[in-house]
Image (cartoon, rainbow, N blue to C red):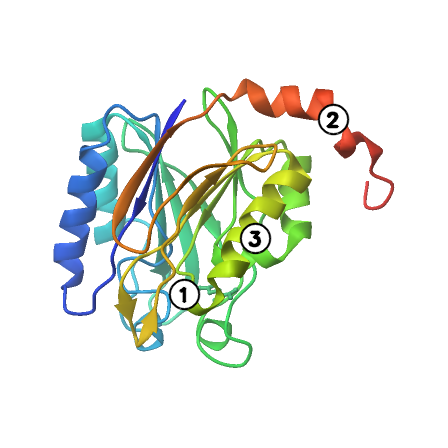
Amino acid sequence: MRVSLIQLAVDPAEPADARRARAARLVREQRTSDLVVLPELWHIGAFAYESFTRDTETVAGPTARAMAEAARDAGVWLHAGSIAERPEPGGPVFNTSLVLSPAGELVRTYRKIHRFGFDQGEAVLMSAGTEIVTVPLPETTLGLATCYDLRFPELFRALVDAGAQTLVVPAGWPERRREHWTLLARARAVENQSYVLACGTAGTHAGVPQAGHSLVVDPWGAVLAEAGPDEEVLTVDLDPAKVAKTREEFPALKDRVLGR
Ligand SMILES: NC(=O)CCC(=O)C(=O)O
């Protein structure tokens, strides 16, 4: 199973429509992949708080439409990262991930459960999701999480209990906490004996330099590929059978005592 993580640069000087067109072009270039992943809130920037309630969309809006066409043209499963979703005019805004099929259909959405910012930014401007979301693909079952969610192991355990084998984490993670990003991505892979596809952004927006360093981690915790700081596409061939093999050969998940 071939996966491509598109570590997109988010530059405030680039209009959102131009970035959508560029992201769509990059998705179309991944036609040899089975699954393509984009980062969190790439249409506005994960730290561009002033955009959170201003530049909102629905799941039928311009980002979703551009991504549906790109997924269909490339014939790939597409985790299109997340958008600032406002389902109803004047209603709450969610940080919502979109998963599209190779036919360009929106098959699942995930609303980020843990909002970042303590008492500012996302934590006050957006509403929290409540639903654990998995997506069965032909080769693996995805478990969905977003950025700050990476710090909450109980979410990932719940995803594994719901059948997840490949944990997908779009993010807009800052450079100043890059060590946490790589450490936590590997920890979530090891403790859940799952692949982790962690896809961040590049560049600087809202004055916050982004970490880049997207990574693909295998169920044993080995980093199969890691990006640098700039815009880059990481393409990796995964062996979906490795999840069951790892869980069978080192059955730590079966030894759980609490929370079963
Ligand atoms: N967009 C985010 O969720 C940022 C998370 C973050 O900066 C951190 O957990 O550290």
Q: Secondary structure at mark 2?
A: loop
Occupied quadrant, residue 220: top right
Occupied quadrant, residue 225: top left
Badge 3 is on which residue? 183
N-terminal label among 2 and 3: 3
Which mark is drawn over residue 37?
A: none
Q: Is residue 160 visible?
A: yes
- State how far apart marks 3 and 1 are (Cα): 14 Å
- Amino acid carrying label 1: it is Glu
- Amino acid carrying label 3: it is Leu
Is residue 210 left or right of 251 when viewed as pictured? left
N-terminal label among 3 and 1: 1
- State how far apart marks 2 and 1 are (Cα): 34 Å
Residue at image coords 44%, 69%: 176
Q: Nearer the viewer, residue 150 or 181?
A: 181
Dot 3, how many residues are within 10 Å of its Cα: few (below 14), some (14-19), or many (20+)? few
For the C terminus, which image quadrant? top right
Q: Secondary structure at mark 1?
A: helix
Residue at image coords 69%, 51%: 154
N-terminal label among 2 and 1: 1
Q: Picture coordinates of residue 8 (x, y %)?
A: 27, 52
Badge 1 is on which residue? 175
Q: Is residue 92 visible?
A: no
Badge 2 is on which residue? 250
For the N terminus, which image quadrant? top left
Above or below — where is 170 with respect to 104?
below
Disc 2 to disc 1: CB gap under 8 Å: no
How many marks overall?
A: 3
Q: Nearer the viewer, residue 105 or 154?
A: 154
